[in-house]
């Protein structure tokens, strides 16, 4: 039989909350694949310099972005950015739709927050 130790009511309350909370899996906390993070860091370093200091700042940057934007929306934004560079009507669809504009705004806000925190 396991013995029970008595704790103050605050400790019991904290234990009950912890027990009632759904357990967070590592996949839930880090849904960006390593390759996606590395790709972002490589691009960031190309744009900002290829030093150890910039590596740290770019790594911080993608961590902040990942904390603000779910991976599926990040992929959507990457697609929009890539396709908006295509000339003609196809690229125009990715540059002018309201959905694309909102996705880009969200991403740019996350990048701005990352810049404030990391650079």
Image (cartoon, rainbow, N blue to C red):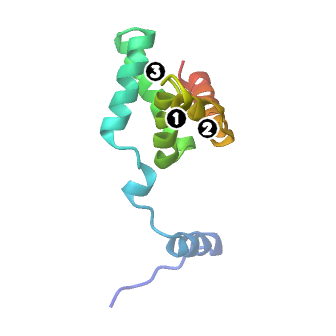
Badge 1 vs badge 3, beta-carbon distance below 8 Å: no
Mark 3 Cα-neighbour bin, 10 Å: few <14, some 14–19, many ≥20? many
Mark 2 Cα-neighbour bin, 10 Å: few <14, some 14–19, many ≥20? some
Q: Seen from this angle, which residue lies furthest front?
A: 89
Residue at 36% of width from left, 36% of height from top?
36
Badge 1 vs badge 2, beta-carbon distance below 8 Å: yes
Q: For the residues marked 1 and 2, what is the alpha-carbon distance in whole angstroms? A: 6 Å
Tag nearer the camera, 1 or 3: 1
Q: Is residue 67 above or below residue 20?
A: above
**Residue holding disc 1:** 80
Image check: 79 left or right of 99? Answer: left
Mark 1 Cα-neighbour bin, 10 Å: few <14, some 14–19, many ≥20? many
Check the picture and name the quadrant holding the C terminus: top right
Residue at 31% of width from left, 39% of height from top?
34
Residue at 58% of width from left, 26% of height from top?
117
**Disc with the residue nearer the chain's start (1 vs 2):** 1
Which quadrant holds residue 10? bottom right
Q: Position of residue 115 (x, y in %)?
A: 57, 22
Label 1: which secondary element: helix
Visible in this render: residue 53? no
**Residue holding disc 3:** 57
**Disc with the residue nearer the chain's start (2 vs 3):** 3
**Residue holding disc 2:** 100
Question: In front: 105, or 94?
Answer: 94
Check the picture and name the quadrant holding the N terminus: bottom left
Question: In front: 92, or 109?
Answer: 92
Residue at 41% of width from left, 49% of height from top?
31
Which quadrant holds residue 113? top right
């Amino acid at each position: 039989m396991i013995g029970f130790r008595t704790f103050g009511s605050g400790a019991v309350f904290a234990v009950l909350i912890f027990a009632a909370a759904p357990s967070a899996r590592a996949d839930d906390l880090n849904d960006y694949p390593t390759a996606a993070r590395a790709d972002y860091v490589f691009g960031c370093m190309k744009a900002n310099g290829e030093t150890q200091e910039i590596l740290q700042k770019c790594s911080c940057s993608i961590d902040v972005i990942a904390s603000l934007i779910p991976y599926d929306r990040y992929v959507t934004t990457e697609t929009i950015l890539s396709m908006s560079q295509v000339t003609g009507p196809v690229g125009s669809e990715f540059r002018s739709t309201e959905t694309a504009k909102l996705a880009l705004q969200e991403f740019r806000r996350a990048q701005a927050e990352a810049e404030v925190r990391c650079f």
